[in-house]
Amino acid sequence: MSEPVPILTPGVEPSSGRSHSPPSGEKFPFPEEKMANVSNSEWNDAEANVLPEKVAEMESKGELPKNTDRKRVVVVGLGMVGIAFIEKLMKYDVKRREHDIVVIGEEPHLAYNRVGLTSFFQHRVVENLYLNPQEWYSGMPEGSLNYHLNTKVTGIDSKNKTVETSSGTTVPYDVLVLATGSDAVLPRHTPGHDAKGVFVYRTIDDLERLIEFSSTRKGTTGAVVGGGLLGLEAAHAMMDLEDFKTVKLIERNRWVLSRQLDGDAGGMVVEQVRALGLDVLLSKRVGKILTNAENYVSGVVFEDGEEMDCSCVCFAIGIKARDELARKAGIKCADRGGGIIVGNDLLTSLPDIYAIGECASWENQTFGLIAPGIEMADVLAFNLTQAKAHAPRKFKSPDLSTKLKLLGVEVASFGDFFADRDGPKSMPARAKKEGMNGARDTVKKLTEGAAPPPVKALTYKDPFSQVYKKYIFTMDGKYILGGMMIGDTKDYIKLVPMVKNQKALEIPPSELIIGAQKGDDDGDDLTDDTQICSCHNVTKGDVVNSVKDGTCKSIGDVKSCTKAGTGCGGCMPLVQTIFNKTMSSMGQEVKNHLCPHFEYSRADLFNIIYVKNLTEFDAVMKEAGKEPNSTGCEACKPTVGSIIASLFNKHLLDDSRRGLQDTNDRFLANIQRNGTFSVIPRVSAGEITPEKLIIIGMVAKKYNLYCKITGGQRIDMFGARKQDLPDIWQELIDGGMESGHAYAKSLRTVKSCVGTTWCRFGIGDSVGMAVRLEERYKSIRAPHKIKGGVSGCVRECAEAQNKDFGLIATEKGFNIFVAGNGGAKPKHSELLAKDVPPDDIVPILDRYLAFYIRTADKLQRTARWIENLPGGIKYLQEVILEDKLGIAADLEKQMEDLVGSFFCEWTEVLQDPKKRAWFSQFANTSENIVDTIEPTQERGQERPSYWPKDSVTEDFKNHQWSELSWQPLVKAEEFQDLPTGDSKAVKRGDTQLAIFKIKGKWYCTQQMCPHKRAFVLSDGLIGDDVANNKLWVSCPYHKRNYELGGDNAGRCANDESVNIATFPIEVRDDGLVYVKLPSVEELDSVLGTKKFVIKKSETTDPFDALDKKLEKMKMKGRKGFSVSHLEGGLGEKKKASMILAGGERGAGGLDW
């Protein structure tokens, strides 16, 4: 025996999730080459293939972990399963470097593709079969991989944790993995089995001996015994040799592939291989091998007495697990059939010794297919590396589905393919189990035999095209259990996941074979009378008709004519889609321009700002705007502000950016309908301590805030006045909290269930993962809000499949879902990648979110984005997982830069007196006006009364004042000269006014928007139309646009029913701003705040009728308190007051 070849190589790194397969499991095509070894790629771990390059990159960046405590993993066997385990362990471990590997192989070759042995007869080059080139081994981190070839392990000392080799070397281990494989079965009971010319079909050495022998037997007959997968491969190989005149296949059953196919399918395969020149003998058993005087094969005698001449016999009748090393070491092995006994964790009867592949016996089964062995390798590698952050995986009943091409014949079987013959091995939990619930009584069973299997088979047979399909379903046709196919196997890749997932079919079973019947196209989902804008009761037909009759030629026209999108704005993506489709149907060009100021889409503008490094709005307008000196408008300003924030993460309230923000971003809180704000601190993944709950409760109590738990597992505090916001933030931040960005078009929450933290069903730490993701992506601005979710198992308690990104724990890691949302047009998420290890989640999401931020349209959720993305989810997988565009590294860097620049926006305000001053209600006084909507007491809390239905239609614009005089109202230094304009509210008497300074010019209007009697105009965005000399302010509530100057000053451009009063204004040398106003009394009589306070009496309670019905049943929306409360209980207010006063545990308060 030659000396072993030890080579030190460096371990490995997953490629940031770059090559995770799409969820269908479809292999993307490899380039066609003449080298036969390209077929080996399907057996490699795709991420492991690029590990040398990744390792080199990490080493150049200094990212490889150094000096870590490492365990030595010794692998016995360098076959396909052994190398699969090594690849996966190194992939999982590269970022950790917690393991070093020593692998000992008995053959003189590196790991090769045993499944592709047939190709060796064509090229005769062993290296073409290698699963990894030698350079791959040497490309690992230094010291991480050490291999020995041509070396047999002869003993295991489990007490001292060492193995002995045939070279006399003792190798210590911390973890020992036995991947010794199996031997081909040779029937030693058959006379002549040891003759010259008898072979098995197992190793390269077997093939080389067969090739050498066949060259001496040209023109004779070769025989293969065994009509299974291996037998057909061996027959194919012997035919390719072209040395034998005839090759005969001997099969003891009535058809070939009897373990995968039924009689009809197997018979069709026989017909096809016979047509290709293979002589198939069925129902034949070899009883004896005939030999000549020199003990060379001369023929065989069958058990029925018939003889057949041949010069060579190759046996392909099965394999036997190699367990002799384990038996010698005292490891428990199966008595019947052999194999090293392992549990669900692949552990043997001795600690720290595992067995995987064909040598392992799991639940009294050994597996001769490669797929179960690779699954075992993955489970073990995962558990050794990832189980710290995830529940350990268990090896389960493997999928024995098979798809291959034998002698040019496409053959596949999948799932429970013999369920109609042997009965189903298992049934979907929700399937109707007809025939299994006592339908046949005992007498019938005795007289008529056992009940037929509770399944139905759907069969298609085309003898002309040589196509056969049989799919097996539950009795109700709702679930597919398995099947087989010959000739046409293209649906295999689609059907295997359907069986695995046990998801109810949404189509009739017949469609899986013959396809769907094409019906008439019924057009779009929505009818013309479908309401698409609930704020203004606009239907789809309203929008379509306004476009078709020529009234509206742009999305701006649609908003102006129909009012769609001028309310809350939530319908705009749908309105835009309807507009685009209608224009296209008329043959009109649809321009996706941001607004009249920019002839670019949001994605185009993003790239311009990114490439040219534009950080200020005026620079963007000069570089890309139609009018270089324009102020912009309510559409482009927030979009540009969002893009700049997405790229450079500067504070929104810096001077040059404050005027770009809608009211929510301008005051870092969500404005509510009474002019107050809601405050939501960050509660990552919904995990919160009792101390933080107490702080939130104290703040809410102190500022009289209405509290509600949000759908994203946070606590929302409503009713905060603008002037109180900094003080509220101060108390929350002092308590260890920060901004929750509930006001922003950014990450809101990553919702989670408790997962393995507490739940007995959890298989993944959903809380831990969700916390990490929310902490990573918090504050990052995007085209629209982003919501995430992480569920710890398939029960999906976190509802991750309707989020912009969602994770569901699987035994192998997490499935990543993307592009789902609720809202006006709900959409389920789509599966981006499956079974992603915890370590690789972040790089995939980094790429996905960065790509969305770059390419989405303004105010476009991920659901609509992926619908409009050419190629949809398939294209997204290619970009994110396969780096089709070559931008993956750039996307990751962009996200890394953003993550690294995080700051709390609330904290920055508190640290900057100038920013803090912007939260005063009025610029000219410290007095405040509160409660412009009368409070209503409800369920122990205060909320604003309902809005009245009608707007204020009084003609403020043309009101005739008795007398006007110039009044000094505010210091001019309170206003800045900003490209986006500056504005503030002032108070005179009981009247609130809004003052604007825009490019050196001053404007004054009433503060109240008549649409909803909201005193908010000073907080609106300023827009202009330079060509037509128009300037307006857009109400932050529902985007009513009021002109500020000119003959139409005070006119509402998109709602003629309302208008506002405007007043002359000027700045004088004394530094004060003067406004020409009537007397205080007259001004208050027309515009006074008290006059327009919304009172509870103006509206009716929508629950009055329901409450009357419930009152008759002695309930008011819920059970009476007496049902759940203790007799003599204090109640919430008294109990809370006692605790706050220190009375719960004496004068000291709570005893912590």
Image (cartoon, rainbow, N blue to C red):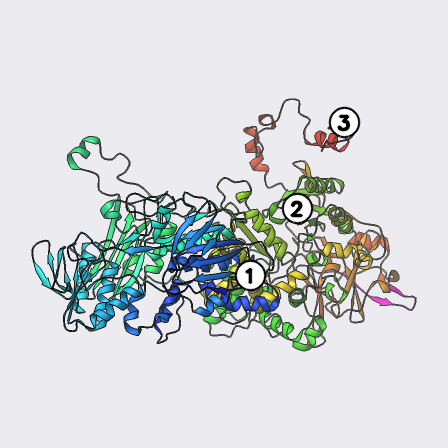
- Mark 2 to mark 3: distance in Å? 32 Å
Which residue was labeled with disc 1? 843
Q: What's the residue type where badge 1 is placed?
A: Pro
- Mark 1 to mark 2: distance in Å? 32 Å
Q: What's the residue type where badge 2 is placed?
A: Asp
Q: Nearer the viewer, residue 693 or 295?
A: 295
The residues colored magenta run 1061-1074
Q: In this image, 1083 relative to 544: left or right?
A: right
Magenta-drawn stretch contains 1063: yes
Q: Quadrant of residue 662?
A: bottom right
Q: Earlier in the sequence, mark 2 or mark 3?
A: 2
Which residue was labeled with disc 3? 1146
Q: Nearer the viewer, residue 662 or 206?
A: 206
Is residue 545 among the parts visible in the rendering? no
**Which one is in front in this view, the residue at disc 1 or the one at disc 2?**
1
In which quadrant will I find the N terminus?
A: bottom left
